[in-house]
Amino acid sequence: MIATRSTNSSHRRNAFTLIELLIVIAIIGILIGFLVPAVSGALKRARVVSVKAEISQLETAIGKFRSVYNMDPPSSIKLYEAASDWAGDPDSRALIRQLWPQFNFGMDRYINSDTDQTDVINLSVGECLVFFLGGINVTNTPGVANIGGCTGFSKNPADPFARGGNREAPLFEFLPARFTDLAEIPAFPNGDGFPEYRDPLPTQTMPYLYYSSYDGQGYRDTVAPFEFDTTASGSAGLSAAYRQGAAATDPRWKVNSFQIISPGYDRQYGYGGTYVGSGSDRLPLCAAIGSTPAPTQKQRDYEADNITNFSAGELQP
Ligand SMILES: [Ca+2]
Ligand SMILES: [Ca+2]
Ligand SMILES: [Ca+2]
């Protein structure tokens, strides 16, 4: 025999009293009060995880670069369109020769996409990350915010910066929408046309930094004018790659390879990685640093949310 469900609802109440309704509304309000921060905190954490994932993809791409070129990408170099300009820069010439042994230093060339062959292109940190993993950009005219996608390098070993022809594929798929080209030179308020890359945080305005240890030879902190600065005053050039402590003698993170640094949600790098550059290489100063930089608690605070490829992925000074 099959039991049938009673349809008798005479004991069921059809309406809430006003007080019950108010209590329910209050409880819902309290729950929302708990849930909203929990959800937004979870979302924030998920986004930090996505930045960490992207940093490890960049590490993989640098590994691919190493397998092709037998070295990590430099994090500072000058490129010259005019053949005669290479003579004055043995450091950059040596790096190019390491990467492309058959490079023809004797020819004038186009490297950016304007119409002259006279530019000196000064690539530092974040720009090197994009340039060496992505190659030549479709469009990158100084002062014009029209940076296109990366097209890799030419397979012509004498002229890897040539446009068109047979090409090596980019080693990392940079999304042009996340390029930024910070104003580095007053004459070019939109930058030099060579982009840096922002992480996927929705509010991000500042790029990843990339510091090479030059295959364990050491982070180049004092090579003027386009390397990094480890002095407390920050007066010698660009910022420092991070150490494992505040003292100048503390060992670096990733001594034998490279550092990749996102400034995190606060868009500030902090003391260890703060840009305090000068001249044509400088990026905007950290607001709290001012003209006489010194390590303050505020600057250490900036580091707390930095996302990196060292220190377990997050800096907690
Ligand atoms: Ca040019
Ligand atoms: Ca630039
Ligand atoms: Ca930060």
Image (cartoon, rainbow, N blue to C red):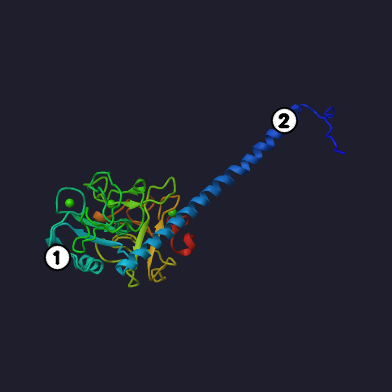
Judging depth in this view, the residue of 280 and 92 nearest the camera is 92
Above/below status of 126 relative to 18: below
Name the residue at 38% across, 71% down. Answer: 256
Q: Mark 1: which amino acid?
A: Ala
x then y, percent, for residue 200: 43, 49
Disc 1 secondary structure class: helix
Q: Badge 1 local density, few (<14 within 10 Å), some, or many (20+)?
A: few
Above/below status of 251 relative to 131: below
Query: To which quarter of the image does residue 235 belong?
Result: bottom left
The residue furthest front is 1
Q: Is residue 105 left or right of residue 26?
A: left
Judging depth in this view, the residue of 109 and 257 nearest the camera is 109
Q: Mark 2: which amino acid?
A: Leu
x then y, percent, for residue 166: 24, 57
Q: Is mark 1 within 8 Å of ligand 1?
A: no
Location of mark 2 (residue):
21
Location of mark 1 (residue):
87
Q: Is residue 107 left or right of residue 292?
A: left
